[in-house]
Image: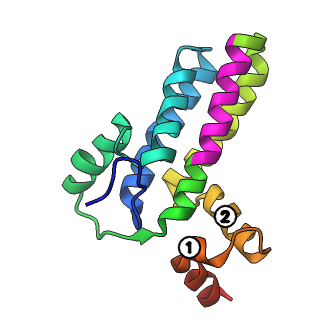
Amino acid sequence: MRSLFSFPNPVNETSARTVAAVVAVLAVVAVAFQQGWLLPVIAYGFVARALTGPTLSPLGLVATRVVTPRLSVRARYSPGPAKRFAQTIGAVFTVTATLVWYVVGSHLAASVLLGVIAVFASLEAGFGLCIGCKTFYLGMRLGLVPPQICEECSRVLRSAA
């Protein structure tokens, strides 16, 4: 049994892509229609998923407990630490966008940050390409992330070489 603040390892790719699809849609709607109220909603989701995976994220819970079990696709898994890093990057971007929107008052700068999230989430949802995960793996290759942080990631990197 996992604790409240543990992150799942491994992560079901179908659930991750489902969450990414909804995040992409929310980000596009927020930017296209200048709906600033969506920024803290999206930011909360990233912070919750970075801390606990789906445990405190309503979107994560719906994806893992409702949507994914009803899809007839073979489960594919990826290492949790890379996905957690990606969620953390999303949290940094969306919390910053929220502060820029509400504190600084620059809707354009906030929209640019949210646009980056929309692109990255779309790549994850549509193609299974996790830019945050690729960045995590690059950090491992460069020695910035110790191999013991993610043994499975180390195996993935060795097999890709």
Instruction: Name the mark on residue 9.
Output: none
Q: What residue would you read off at disc 1? A: 150
In front of the other: 104 or 134:
104
Q: From where the camera sits, is residue 134 visible?
A: yes
Q: How far from the left and from the top, in percent, is residue 84?
A: 53, 55
Quadrant location of the N terminus in the rendered image: bottom left
Label annotation for residue 136: 2
Which of pointers 1 and 2 indicates the residue nearer the eye?
1
Nearer to us in this view, 126 or 99: 99
CB atoms at circles 1 and 2 under 8 Å apart? yes
Q: Residues within 10 Å of mark 1 (few under 14, many from 20)?
A: some
Q: Residue furthest left?
A: 70
Q: Give residue 35's position: percent from left, percent from top.
A: 57, 14
Identify the element where label 1 is drawn: loop
**In the rendered structure, which segment of residues is drawn in magenta?**
88-102
Image color mode: rainbow
Q: Residues within 10 Å of mark 2 (few under 14, many from 20)?
A: many
Residue 121 highlighted magenta (yes or no): no
Residue type at tag 1:
Cys
Q: Which comes before the other along the chain, label 1 or label 2?
A: 2
Q: Mark 1 to mark 2: distance in Å?
A: 10 Å
- Which residue occupies 30% across, 42% down? 61
Q: Residue at x 44, y 53 (%)?
A: 17
In depth, the one of 51 and 139 nearer the eye is 51
**x, y (%) of residue 157?**
63, 82
Residue 98 within the magenta-colored segment of the rendering: yes
Q: Quadrant of the C terminus?
A: bottom right
Whether 149 is drawn above or below 130: the answer is below
Tag count: 2
